[in-house]
Image (spheres, rainbow, N blue to C red):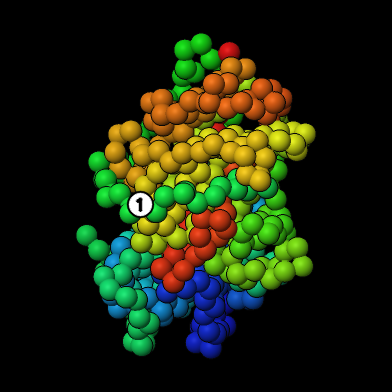
Amino acid sequence: MLIAMAAVTAMATTLVPVFAGDDDGLTLHPVADATLTQVPQDGDTSAKTTLASCPSMCDGNRMGRRDATLQFAVEKLPANAVNVKATLRVYAWQDFAARVLARTLPGDLSVAGNPASLAVAGAAETIDRVTKGYNEFDVSGSVQRNGTYTFALSQENLYTRIYWASRENSKESLRPELVLSYDTQAKPSATTTAPSTALPPPPATTPPTTPPATTKAPEPTKTTAPTTKPPATTAAPDGWRLVWGDEFNSGGLDRSKWNLRGAEGRDIDLGCNVDDPRNTFVGGGNLTLRALKQASTCSSQTRQYTQSYLDTMGKASFTYGRFEIRAKSPNKPETSTGLWPAFWLRPDDGGNGEIDVTELPGGAYYHAKSTAAIFWDYTPVKQDTRIALPGGGIPADGFHTYTTEWDASALKWYIDGKLVWTRDRTTTPWYDKAFNKPYNIRLNFQVGGWLGDPDASTRFPADFVVDYVRVYQR
C-alpha cells in the first residue's frame, strides 16, 4: 500500500493555486505534491522540499518504487481558449541517463495511490535523459480546459533515486510549475465554471534601435516558410572553419561559454535580466530565452517583467568571422508588442561600434522582418534596415538562420543562406574606426524599450528558441 495518501488528500482539498501572468498565459504552481512510495521507511512524504522517483528494485529494494506526483488546479482558462499549450516543468539537481514518463491522472493526488490507476494512465511525454535544471514535459494533450490535473513522474530505469524540487522548496525559482499559453477566438474572459474533478479526454547592454522614419502600414503576413524544425546542417561553409559554437545539446547552459546576467535593470527597457532557470534553460537540443510577466526586483527597482541576457565577455571574443544563429522568434503580429529578441556583437573595449546580426522585435509593424544594423555610437550614428525573409513567411513560423560575415573590408548579412545587405567603406565612412577590434557576442530577449512596450494583447510567457550559435573564421 502506498504511504502518505491520507495526508495528501487532506492537503489537496484545502490549498489554493497560485497564478502569475495575464489573460493570455498562466503559470501555475502545484496545490499539492508528494512522493508516492511503497517503502515504509520513507514515512510521511506529503511535506518535503524534494520529491523522488525510482523504479521497482530501487537501490536493490524490491518494494522500492517511488513516483513524484504533482496536483494542479486549472481554473482560469477562458471558455473560448483554443490551441492550449501546457508544459509541466520540474527541477532536478543532477544530470541522469534515465527514462522518465510524465503520466496524467484524472482528479487529485489520491487517484495516484491506486496502482491500477497508475498502470493505465497515459504517458503525456517521455524524456530519455534528465538534465540539471528544469525538465519539461508537454502535457498539452491532457490539459485543454479547466479541471484538476495530477501528474506522476514515473522512472523506468536507473535503479537509484532522482530527486526533484517540490512546492515547499525555499527557493521559489526551483518550484514546479505548469505553464499555459493559448489563443482565443474572441476577447478572453475569465470563466466562472468550477474546476471539474475528472480529466477531459485528450483532443485528436541591449541593441538600441530607433523606430523607422516612415510610418507605412504593415505588410501582409506570408505563411509559406516551414513551420517545423528541419535538421540543421553541421558542415562548415566552404572556406570557413568552426572556431566557437554552442549546439545546446549538453542538457544545461554551458557557463564556460556564456555569462548569464542576473538582478540587472537597465533604463532602456522594462524587464529585469535574471539568472533564473524559468527564464533561461536548455532542453531538446535548444536554448530557450523566456520572457515572463512577473514582478522582480533589480537595480533597486521592482519591475513587472523578467527576461534573459547572455554574453561572452571575458570568455570569447573575435576580430572578424562569420557569426550565425538558427532561431525561432516568438513574435506573431497580434500578440507580441514590446517583445524584442536579438543576437548581436559589441567591442571588448566597450567603446564605439556594434554589429546586430539580427533583431526580431514584435508588434504589428516589426514582427515580419529581421532588423540588421551597425552603430558607431548611440547619438545615434547608425545604419540599419528591416529585411523580409527571402523565402517568404515570418521569423515566428519556424527556425531561420541569420548570419553576418565580417572582415577588414565589409560586413555582409544573410538570411537562410541568401545575401540580403552589405556595408563597407563606401557606405560607412567610419567602418575602419568601428570594425577593426575584438568583439564579444550578446544574445538576449528584451521586454519593452524604443520599439514599444507590451500592451494588453502581448502574450506571456514568450519563448525565443535558439537551435545553435556558431562562429567561423577563414
User: Is the residue marked by circle 1 packed among few (<14), some (14-19), or many (20+) residues within 10 Å?
Assistant: few
Residue at image coords 47%, 12%: 238
Residue 212 image position (x, y, % from top left): 47, 48
Judge by depth and name the residue closer to the eye, 307 or 161.
307
Residue 104 to residue 376: above or below: below
190 relative position to 44: left or right: left
Residue 407 locus on image (x, y percent): 59, 19
For the question of whether residue 116 can be seen, the reply is no
Q: Residue at x 77, y 67 (%)?
A: 300
User: Is 4 left or right of 84, judged from the image as shown?
Assistant: right
Quadrant position of the C terminus in the picture: top right
User: Tag 1's secondary structure?
Assistant: loop
* Number of numbered discs: 1
Q: Quadrant of residue 54?
A: bottom right
Q: Nearer the viewer, residue 407 or 74?
A: 407
Q: Badge 1 is on which residue?
A: 216
Is 154 above or below relative to 403?
below
* Nearer the observer, 178 or 165: 178
Q: Residue furthest left?
A: 204
Residue type at mark 1: give it.
Lys
